[in-house]
Amino acid sequence: MLIIAVVNLKGGSTKTTTAGHLAQAFHEAGMRTLGVDADGENESLQGWQVAGDLPWPVITMPVSNLHKQLPDVVGDRYDVVVIDTPPMKAQRGTVASAMRIATHVLVPMAPTPIEYDRLPAVRELVDEVAAVRPDGKPPIHAVLLTRVKPRAASTQVYRQLITDDGVTVLTAQIGSLERFAQSWGDPMSGALDTPYGAAAMELLDLSRLQEIIG
Ligand SMILES: Nc1ncnc2c1ncn2[C@@H]1O[C@H](COP(=O)(O)OP(=O)(O)O)[C@@H](O)[C@H]1O
Ligand SMILES: [Mg+2]
């Protein structure tokens, strides 16, 4: 089972938009998908599920012992769990808890200096939780570039900087587009054919790769 924690230090970094479209893409790929809304301040993923009548369930779990509660709730009924987390700065315990059980920590971010400046804090927590994870290893840690402007040279610059820092940057990237900006609360279809679908498949590939190399 894939457990993808969508994480960033601050609000407004496209976490919920990313969690929603990724979950939809996995659902469209035929995988049994569950959304977990761990952001008790906003409950935006849950709200989207209701308003958009999304075809995959969302449960709310804004708790700092997700790693204990989630396995019992999920059982073996899902192939993919996508956790929308609260801003790490405000709710470090909840995010750390999600990271403890996650197979993947996905950080959506715009390729800008202010967003890049926030990455080390996330990385520190990823490394910190490794010791208390069942396997003693950090989860797969990847960045998804979002709100990317067409033809901006900065995209490649940040892609390289983050890669040089030792963090995987997904090949798929999400453009700064009305389609995504306006998507909250609406039904979704065709997510698999967007770059979010490509990102979902890359996350799958990363876990297969990790299984092989151990
Ligand atoms: N690809 C995109 N292009 C343009 N705007 C986007 C895109 N994805 C998200 N947004 C906008 O960015 C803002 C923050 O997104 P949201 O998913 O709510 O972030 P978070 O959950 O991290 O607070 C929202 O106004 C949303 O509409
Ligand atoms: Mg959110």
Image (cartoon, rainbow, N blue to C red):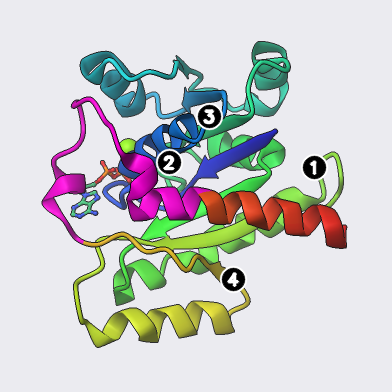
Amino acid found under the numbered disc labelled 1: Arg
Q: Is residue 30 left or right of residue 66?
A: left
Amino acid found under the numbered disc labelled 3: Gly
Amino acid found under the numbered disc labelled 2: Leu
From the image, state whether disc 3 or disc 4 is nearer to you. Answer: 3
Residue at the spot of label 2: 22
- Dot placed on the residue nearer the N-terminal end, 2 or 3: 2
Label 3 element class: loop
- Whole-Å distance between the Cαs marked 1 and 4? 19 Å
Residue at the spot of label 1: 133
Residue at the spot of label 4: 167
The residue that appears at 66% across and 57% down in the rendered structure is 206
Dots 4, 2 in contact, CB < 8 A: no
- Dot placed on the residue nearer the N-terminal end, 4 or 2: 2
Q: Quadrant of residue 78?
A: top right
Q: Is residue 97 magenta?
A: no
Taking the image as drawn, is residue 139 in sight? no
Residue at the spot of label 3: 30
- Whole-Å distance between the Cαs marked 2 and 3? 13 Å
Label 2 element class: helix
